[in-house]
Amino acid sequence: MLGGKTHVTVRIDKNANQNQPVAVSLVIVHNEALFGKLLEMPSKDWFEKREQIKRDYREGESLDYWEWEWVPDQQVPLQELALKPGAVGGLVFAGYNSPGAHRVRIDPLQDIVIHLSEKEFSVETLKK
């Protein structure tokens, strides 16, 4: 895969995460073994283990990540993310209070819209 840029649009409902802030991580993975592990990891585990994962897998080599915390009804400007070549896949994790994996696989080559709602979130792929 070539490097480049991806754009992330964020829409946040007034009652997102049952009216609580939402931590969101967008992770671009360059290591196939790590990607396989992360595909099975619910967001709760990602947020609990991410610091150790970042120590075990070097940023810029095995993974790149962006992290935010947004509040319900927040207006978020368009996020433009610079990508390095060689990604095998991407994931978005959202720290929701409700049960569920709260993890979505993404194609790093595509622009996306993250929609944070009351009990879950969704990711829509946009055509470039």
Image (tube, rainbow, N blue to C red):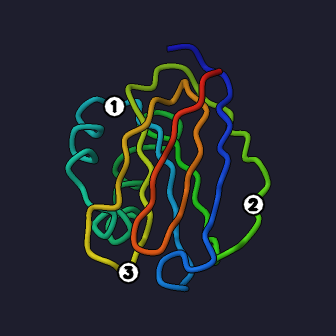
Image quarter where the C terminus lies is top right
* 36 or 127: nearer the viewer: 127
Identify which residue is drawn at 28% across, 29% down: 32
* 13 or 80: nearer the viewer: 13
* Kind of residue indicated by mark 2: Val
Identify which residue is drawn at 40% across, 55% down: 55
Q: Could you tell which of marks 3 and 1 lies nearer the N-terminus?
A: 1
Q: Could you tell which of marks 2 and 1 lies nearer the N-terminus?
A: 1
* Kind of residue indicated by mark 3: Asn
For label 1, count other residues whose C-alpha is less than 10 Å away and answer few (under 14), some (14-19) or many (20+). Answer: some
Q: Secondary structure at mark 1?
A: loop
Image vertical order of residue 4 relative to residue 97, above or below: above
**Count of numbered circles in the view:** 3
Q: Which residue is mark 2?
A: 76
**Callouts 2 and 3 close, C-beta under 8 Å:** no
Q: Could you tell which of marks 2 and 3 lies nearer the N-terminus?
A: 2
Q: Which residue is mark 3?
A: 97
Identify which residue is drawn at 27% across, 61% down: 101
Q: Describe residue 62's horizontal placement relative to residue 74 as left or right.
A: left
Dot in front, 2 or 1: 2
* 85 or 40: nearer the viewer: 40
Image vertical order of residue 26 relative to residue 42, above or below: above
For label 2, count other residues whose C-alpha is less than 10 Å away and answer few (under 14), some (14-19) or many (20+). Answer: few
Dot in front, 3 or 1: 3
State the CA–CA distance, disc 2 to disc 1: 30 Å
What number is the disc on residue 31? 1
For label 3, count other residues whose C-alpha is less than 10 Å away and answer few (under 14), some (14-19) or many (20+). Answer: some
* Kind of residue indicated by mark 1: Asn
Image vertical order of residue 38 relative to residue 6, above or below: below
